[in-house]
Amino acid sequence: MLRLFKQYYPVRNAIFVVGEGLFIVLSVTIASWIIIGNHFLLTSHELVLKTLLIGVVSQACLYYNDLYDLNVTDSFKELFVRLFQALGASAIILAIIYLVFPVCIIGRNVFAISIAFVVTFIVLWRVGYTHVLNHGLFDQKIVVIGEGELAMNIIHQVVDKRDSGHQIVAAVVAKKNERLSAGRGIPEICIDDYEGLCSLSRDLQVQKIVVAIEERRNRFPAKQLLQCRVNGFEIIEGTTFYEMLMGKLIVDKINPSWLIFSDGFHKSASRLFFKRSVDLILCLIMFVLLGPILLAVALLIKLDSKGPVFYSQERVGENRKPYKVHKFRSMVQHAEKECGPVWAQSDDPRVTRVGKFIRKWRIDEFPQLFNVIKGEMSFVGPRPEREFFIKDLEKVIPYYGERFSVKPGVTGWAQVSYPYGDSVEDAKEKLNYDLFYIKNMTIFMDLMVIMRTVKTVLFGEGAR
């Protein structure tokens, strides 16, 4: 398994992405050789950089058009449609780059000719990768022991996630009256008090044992698991495996000791310094690039409805310190005068015409950059919440108060991983992602969140 951004990915997934990038570069190289001639391979490194530019732009468009989401591209028709959409977007972006920086042009018609090779190579590559997935080649075989919701969640997520890199060969329970009813074609095996677990694992040729036992008092098979461990089997606790698999915690199933002794939650001075530096650099870049758009939005808000351009509201920040968050006003003036504080709903009647547009494209969030500059927020972090909702949420959601150990963010891991929520269950699910972020916070993870935020903004997903 490959660890990237504090998550574990099958090595074959990395090979798939890197291999596809190499095929794109190869396609451009062949097209360049056809257009420019044999001396292309003997020229300076500038041509290599120009080729890599086409490769990077093309693969970025593949990513932003969901071509790396295998649940989306599950048919050849969808694959071809999205592939040509991505290549069309690549052509437009490259045309703009060449217009601004003519020195980047590699040769006339190179990209057009390379498209034929790109489509051929990518389709063949994906056919081969689909064969690997469908037959479970190179999957790591595991058994899940335990009964209850945690075991069921793990089984269902592994089965539903085609590229998880794991294959569950059996679900094991200790007593017959604790039938797991896993389904999904997973064999269920009952062994009294887990005796013979090591022999069973050896017979099934597994590499990893996932321990999803929720009730452990006087029932935890320490002796059997120790025997498995010293015999070379990898043992992993269920909630830890779920975290690695899904990129989130599961607050209903973890206890304080798990959080206390688990890795993560590092907040060194150097890490916080770099995070703050990235915040300020991004704010500066966005103000320069988006300044004219923000001025136009302010004018439209003023013309569309009565009231101020900006809307300020008290939120709870790091260490529970209150502060005023700033947004473009997207609702009618005094929207909560009659109903009081409530979560925004789908087709909320309080939202103005301009408000619907700026909410869809997340433009209403941009004034929070002023909060970032003031140090009240970070660019990436948990969503800032109001004290009115926090009091109720802390009563029913475990560990909700831990999200105040970091600065709230303009965007965050929860925001890009889960749609907008308007219920306690939604708030709990978002906390699962927020705690994962706080636990595994790094600059590289922040950059990953920013990339996914750009994708969310471009396609107007998840807003209300």
Image (cartoon, rainbow, N blue to C red):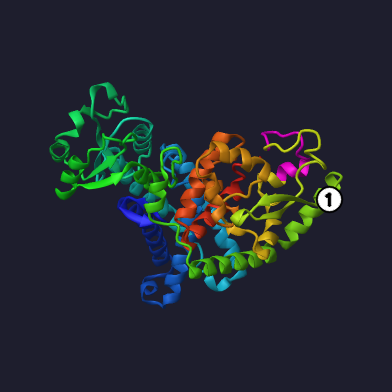
Residue 8, horizontal then vertical, whole percent: 36, 51
Q: Name the residue under label 1.
A: 308
Q: How many marks?
A: 1
Q: Main secondary structure of the magenta part?
A: loop
**Depicted 298 relative to depicted 129: above or below:** below
Horizontally, residue 192 falls left or right of residue 383, namely left
Residue at 34% from the left image edge and 45% from the top image edge: 241
Kind of residue at badge 1: Pro
Q: In which quarter of the image is the C terminus?
A: top right
Q: Does the magenta stretch include residue 355?
A: yes
| Label 1 Cα neighbours within 10 Å, binned few <14 / some 14-19 / many ≥20 | few
- For residue 217, say whether it is visible: yes
Residue at 79% from the left image edge and 39% from the top image edge: 335
Name which quarter of the figure residue 136 lies in: top left
Residue 86, horizontal then vertical, whole percent: 51, 50
Q: Which residue lies furthest to the bottom in this view?
A: 44
**Depicted 350 relative to depicted 439: above or below:** above
Horizontally, residue 58 falls left or right of residue 289, namely left
Please state which of residues 93 and 437 is positioned toward the viewer in this rendering: 437
- For residue 110, say whether it is visible: no
Residue 220, horizontal then vertical, whole percent: 26, 37
Residue at 75% from the left image edge and 45% from the top image edge: 330
Residue at 68% from the left image edge and 41% from the top image edge: 388
Please state which of residues 233 and 329 is positioned toward the viewer in this rendering: 233
Residue 270, horizontal then vertical, whole percent: 49, 70
Q: Which residue lies furthest to the front in this view?
A: 218
Please state which of residues 193 and 182 is positioned toward the viewer in this rendering: 193
Please state which of residues 262 and 143 is positioned toward the viewer in this rendering: 262
Q: Does the magenta stretch include residue 346?
A: yes
Q: Give the range drawn in magenta.
A: 344-357
Secondary structure beneath label 1: loop
Name which quarter of the figure residue 19 lies in: bottom left
